[in-house]
Amino acid sequence: MTEGLVVAGVGAGLFVGAGAVSVLAGMPPSQVVGAVAVAVAAVALYLLITRAGHAFVAVLAVLGALLATGVAGVAAEAVLTGAGRTQDVVVTTVAYEPAGNPAYYCSVRRQDGSPVETRLWRGCGPSVTPGDLIGIVYDPAGRVAPRGVAGPGNLLRGAVASVLLLFAFAVVCFLAVVRSYRVPSTGSVQPRG
């Protein structure tokens, strides 16, 4: 049981640490997800070596993939909430994209004319037209991409979802390690005499 608790704790710490350090180091989102995926792979490999069972490892891999994107998003939101600056930008085009997550996306430029590379979906909608001003929040250090200004609950919602996934991951990890120890059944003991 102690080993299960240690592996669950270290695994959870690896994910949070990899996500936070990657974002703070200014890595792009794909590399942040990659760093967390490496941590997931390390825990999965350990569980395979200890013969924890393929079903447990498969569940951990799915939870780890969800965690990789969740941790990266929460870390980026935290950076923007803590160090971000807001600014009004000018909408240049508005496009509705029904594929994947259906949403309106706005291409924008700063008021000095310089373009913003990231298209925004927060603050963009059917009522927004080219020439309108919408707000963005950006990191002056450039560690994360700018985003549309959103309500204060975004960080909280993302953090709650990530904590729940992290807890589920830790529980499954603990159970996998405990299950890897084969305890002989009591029926195999030979009677004396």
Image (tube, rainbow, N blue to C red):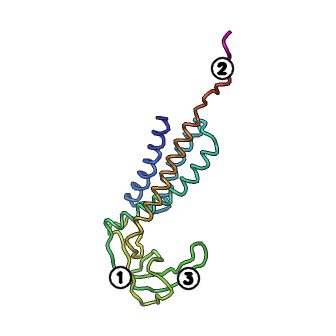
Judging depth in this view, the residue of 41 and 169 nearest the camera is 169
Residue at x-position 35% and y-position 85%: 111
Q: Which residue is mark 1?
A: 88
Q: Which residues are magenta?
A: 189-193
User: In this rendering, would 111 be left or right of 97?
Assistant: left
Magenta stretch containing residue 106, yes or no? no
Q: Amino acid at mark 1?
A: Asp
- Is the residue 27 above or below the residue 52 in the image? below
Percent across and percent down for residue 82 are 32, 65
Neighbours of disc 2 within 10 Å: few (<14), some (14-19), many (20+):
few
- Look at the image and tell me in which quarter the C terminus lies: top right
Q: Which residue is mark 2?
A: 189
Query: Gap between marks 2 and 1, in whole Å?
Result: 76 Å
Q: How many marks?
A: 3
Of the image marks 1 and 3, the number of the one nearer the N terminus: 1
Dot label at residue 96: 3
Percent across and percent down for residue 10 are 44, 43
Of the image marks 2 and 3, the number of the one nearer the N terminus: 3
